[in-house]
Amino acid sequence: MADEKAAFTVRDTIRGIEGHLDPARFRRVHRSAIVNVEKIHELRPQAHGDYRIVLDGGAQLTLSRSYRSALGALLNATG
């Protein structure tokens, strides 16, 4: 049962969801994505100041320029 993936439907804006999450663990990285920073494996620089976020499981997300400074400050604070 632990290996099964669960899916949940949430009827809220991403800003609303972001407001319910712990900002020490979760950060907005794109207009359509929030990430658990503990799951970030690697940041790869891309063109135009964007980054590719590689998560522990291999999934990849885009870190856009507008959210880069907030994530960078959190990553620097956590080591």
Image (cartoon, rainbow, N blue to C red):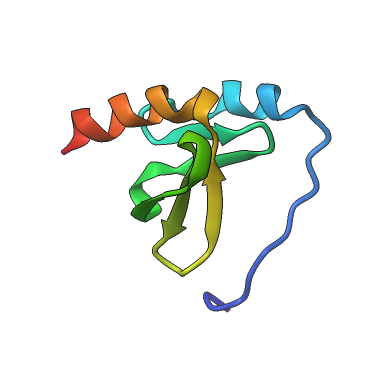
Number of labelled discs?
A: 0
Q: Residue at x 43, y 59 (%)?
A: 55
The residue at the far front in this view is 47
67 relative to 38, above or below = above
Say which quarter of the image contains residue 17.
Answer: top right
Residue at (46%, 35%) from the top-left corner?
49
Image x and y of residue 50, in percent? 49, 39
Question: Which residue is most to the left?
Answer: 79
14 or 43, nearer to the observer: 43
Residue nearest the observer in this picture, 39 or 1:
39
Q: Nearer the viewer, residue 33 or 64?
A: 64
* Residue for point 54% across, 78% down: 3
If the image is split into quadrants, where does the N terminus sit? bottom right
Residue shown at 54% from the left, 35% from the top: 64
The image position of residue 8, as x and y in percent, is 74, 52
Q: Is residue 53 above or below residue 3?
A: above
Above or below 58: residue 63: above
Nearer to the camera, 8 or 67: 67
Q: Is 6 displayed left or right of 20 in the figure?
A: right
| Image quarter (top left, top right, bottom left or bottom right) of the C terminus | top left
Q: Quadrant of residue 19?
A: top right
Q: Is residue 34 left or right of residue 75?
A: right
Q: Position of residue 32 (x, y in %)?
A: 69, 38
x then y, percent, for residue 57: 45, 69
Residue furthest right in the image: 11
Q: Where 64 sits versus 41, above or below?
A: above
